[in-house]
Amino acid sequence: MAMPPPSDSPPWRTHHPRYTGANHPLPSRHRWWLHPAADIALAVGLLVIDVIAALGVFVHGVDAAGYRMFDAAADNSSVSLARPFAHVAVAGHVVLGSAVLLLIARARISGGVQALAGIVLVLVAMTGMHDTDGRVPPTACPGLLRRPWSTVPVRR
């Protein structure tokens, strides 16, 4: 029968290759969360970047749609704002992707703030696209006279 270890020996094997002595225990193996102060600072910084990026994307989308911002004589009544809001929706999805990466990196506060910012951006974009649909008359497509799922012919 084997003898029990002496009472003054440590509870782990002393011949373990990573053991460095009684005053230096083995390092813990669990992953740590990001410190709350660092997480809040990261969340604020990323939120500022999100706001700047969303405004930049919207302005770029307005420019791509053909809106003349600083031309007083320009007729901007026919410009649809659905395209700029589509750009904002893409930016919102990028923010949601970054929220997933932050949550994987165990930054709880920043990931939650990024997720909320991404959801807000997507909702604002969807609301903007829905509001602009009724203001601009749709252009007719010459090749489509009927809807493929409808049996009722469209009036000409």
Image (tube, rainbow, N blue to C red):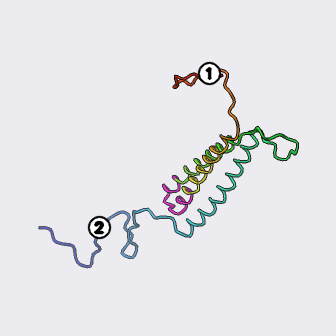
The residue stretch that appears in magenta: 100-114
- What is the three-letter code of the residue carrying label 1? Leu
The quarter of the picture where the C terminus appears is top right
Q: What element carries label 1?
A: loop
Q: Which residue is drawn at 62% across and 44% down?
A: 130
Q: Distance between the residues labelled 2 and 1?
A: 82 Å
Please determine whether, in this image, residue 152 is positioned above or below residue 37. Answer: above
Indicate left or right for 93 with 17 as reference: right
Please state which of the two labelled residues, at mark 2 or mark 1, is closer to the viewer: 1
Q: In this view, does 82 lie to the left or right of 123?
A: right
The N terminus appears in which quarter of the rendering? bottom left
Please, is residue 83 above or below residue 18 in the view?
Answer: above
Q: Where is residue 75 in the image (x, y as percent from the top left)?
A: 83, 40
Q: Which amino acid does label 2 sit on?
A: Arg
Task: Using the rendered view, name the quadrant where residue 80 is placed.
Answer: top right
Crowding at label 1, few (<14), some or many (≥20) Cα neighbours within 10 Å? few
Residue 32 in magenta?
no
50 left or right of 35 in image: right
Using residue 76 as the reference point, say whether residue 53 is left or right of it.
left
Image location of residue 148, percent across then percent down: 54, 23
Depth order, front residue of 6/60:
60
The secondary element bearing badge 2 is classed as loop
